[in-house]
Image (spheres, helix red, strand yellow):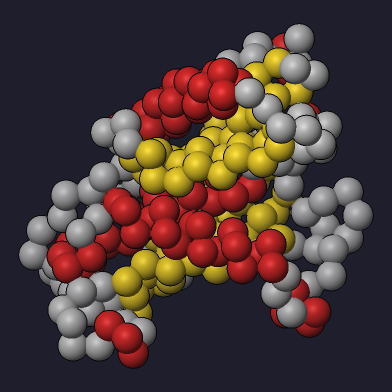
Amino acid sequence: MRNGQRLANGLRQVNIEYGVQPYADGSVLIQMGRTHVLCAVTVEEKVPPFLKDRGQGWITAEYGMLPCATHSRGRREAISGLSGRTHEIQRLIGRSLRMMVDLRLLGERTFRVDCDVLNADGGTRCASITGGALAVRMAIGKLVAQSKLAAMPPLLPVAAVSAGVVGGQPVLDLEYSEDSAADVDANFVMSGDGRWIEVQTTAEGAPFRPELFTAMAELATAGIGRLLMLWDQDGWQG
């Protein structure tokens, strides 16, 4: 039995709070167990130079961990410079969130999604994607309410979850103590219609057999299905 009496296919407790930052165009505080991430969206009435006059919008992300998000204080990357890990996570979040809407329907606007990790206990990039998608939906709804968009565009729900192999057992939604001891570590991003957006899988120490990947993918599919139910819950201002 895992911490919190979780089974192998169990998600940590998930809580969502909308409108945490009132000056943002959309904001969500997502809590997955002891991992807490604040996702806030700023809408800019311009696009990057490479998209200028192409009639489409853009969604990009910035990710960071507060110095005391982990058991030992981390140095602020505003001082030390962005690590390779941070660059990689930011790009993953941006790629994932751009899958949720036809960018041509947003006009020439940039949705800048800030994902700040308040507490880290594993799965911060996945929580950032799940919470960031809900925050983007909120920001688009605000544009519609302000008559800056004629109608709510079709949105494809997006969510993400980690999975891994710990002690030879495939498990879902790893907390840090499991992640740090995992034989295999994976992150799965999926759309609401059951299609994969991105899968990151790494063997730690030794290669693993295909059937273990299949088991992790099945756990992730079911777990993301439960996370996508957040899209059907009330609480956001659309």
Whole-percent x, y for residue 5 in the image? 72, 12
Whole-percent x, y for residue 166 in the image? 75, 23
In the rendered image, is residue 135 in sight?
no
- In this picture, residue 168 sits left or right of residue 74: left
Residue with the most extreme left position:
150
- In this picture, residue 127 sits left or right of residue 22: right
- In this picture, residue 144 sits left or right of residue 223: left
Q: Check the image and report above or below for 201 versus 216.
A: below
Q: Identify the residue shown where x is 41% and y is 53%.
A: 96
Quadrant of the image occupied by residue 48: bottom left
Q: Identify the residue shown where x is 63% and y is 23%.
A: 209
User: 143 or 155, which is in the foreground?
Assistant: 155
- Which quarter of the rendering shows the N terminus? top right
Whole-percent x, y for residue 17 in the image? 49, 44
In the rendered image, is residue 217 in sight?
yes
Quadrant of the image occupied by residue 10: top right
Residue with the most extreme right position:
72
Whole-percent x, y for residue 172 in the image? 61, 24
Q: Check the image and report above or below for 164 versus 60.
A: above
Q: Identify the residue shown where x is 80% and y is 19%.
A: 167
